Image: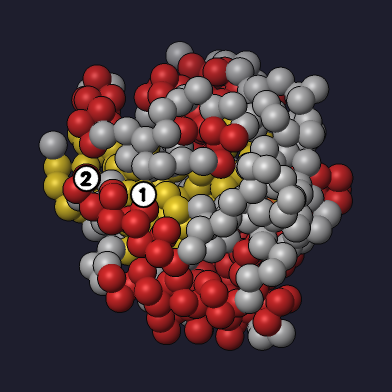
Amino acid sequence: MILKKLQDISIKLKKGQRLSKQDGLRLLDSFDILAMGKLALTEKKKKTADQVFFNVNCHVNLTNICVSRCAFCAFSRDTDDPNAYHMTIHDTLERVQAALPAGITEIHMVSGLHPDKPFGYYVDVVKTLKQEFPSIHLKAFTPVELKYFSDISGLTVAEVLRQLQAVGLDSLPGGGAEVLSERIRQKLCPYKASSHEWLDIMQTAHMLGLKSNATLLFGHIETAEEIIDHILLIRRLQDETGGFQAFIPLPFHPTHTMMTSCTKPTACEILKMFSVARLMLDNIDHIKAYWVMTGMQAAQLALFFGADDIDGTVTEEKITHAAGAETAVGITKNVLISLIKQADMLPVQRDTLYNVMERY
Ligand code: SF4
């Protein structure tokens, strides 16, 4: 039974009408998460029926040394920190080689903004990975990294992207968006790409034929209006380019960050965010529950609240674990399949571009 308060939203959805900013704010303000979940599940089924997607991938984080030192980041280090590291190209090859027996189809590569590495290093990493593993999709570099490459090389972002594409970059991840609000970025991450730059870089990438994802880091200092505005900015760009494959709500992990006074989002807050994302983003096909950050249990529940993708096997995740994530650093395909089956949905192994590889 949909609460009277949400009935007009339910009617709009049934008619296929797009929800407004006001609708989004009312959803975020509502505590009837079961009603929202029901609406979101209906919208999910319109797009992907009972399918839930996952992939088999490995994560590579070239370095944790970063000049930006964002307040919410537990991963980054200064150069002289005893826990600072950076990978050589050889290390990178070894990491991927070790993941091959699992049948990976994707390398997901994001890293800190290293003060000394020239842009040519990243070109060489991509080129070498593609030469060694030509059939593996390389999804790498957030708009924040791409803006940094542009700054250190003097090239335009478009030229940076063209050079990376020419040697094997296949698509972009969705990170670095945090909350697309200048108020928040000035407080939490003033030294990296602004909201407009993040959006402009995604637009450029989409125009060059590169697909990407989009994220939202929630549960810190943001307001409800800033969350909805973030979602609307993504929706507007998607209307223009169609380049976003999935939207990924990421609950903030405060441990070991400069924001330890924040508390982790609760299960209700996480599930509500998935529902709101599914209901507002009528033009993005997939809502991804990144289990590393939501936790396994919430990721499974998110499938009833609008999510249709549970990300991948991930080996070996470093960024969220630096912030105290209690999830595994990687997981097997069978665990993901079983998690999806327990929710009475159909596990579908996909490649990065959502081509179906196998149904289980
Ligand atoms: S979030 Fe990214 S840019 Fe910010 S400090 Fe961490 S690694 Fe650096």
**Viewer-side residue, 130 vs 289:** 130
x 22%, y 25%: residue: 338
- Earlier residue among tags 2 and 1: 1
Vertical position of residue 176 compared to residue 29: above or below:
below
State yes or no: discs 2 and 1 in contact (Cβ < 8 Å).
yes
Vertical position of residue 74 compared to residue 94: above or below:
above
**Viewer-side residue, 195 vs 95:** 95
Badge 1, how many Cα within 10 Å: few under 14, some, many 20+?
many
Locate residue 107, reporting x and y percent: 37, 57
On-image quarter of the N terminus: top left
* Residue 346 is at least partly visible in this image: yes
Instruction: Kindly identify which residue carries mark 1.
Output: 58
Instruction: Kindly identify which residue carries mark 2.
Output: 102
x 23%, y 36%: residue: 333
Could you tell me the amino acid type at mark 1?
Cys
Displayed quadrant of residue 311:
top left
Could you tell me the amino acid type at mark 2?
Ala
Displayed quadrant of residue 143:
bottom right
Locate residue 343, reporting x and y percent: 28, 22
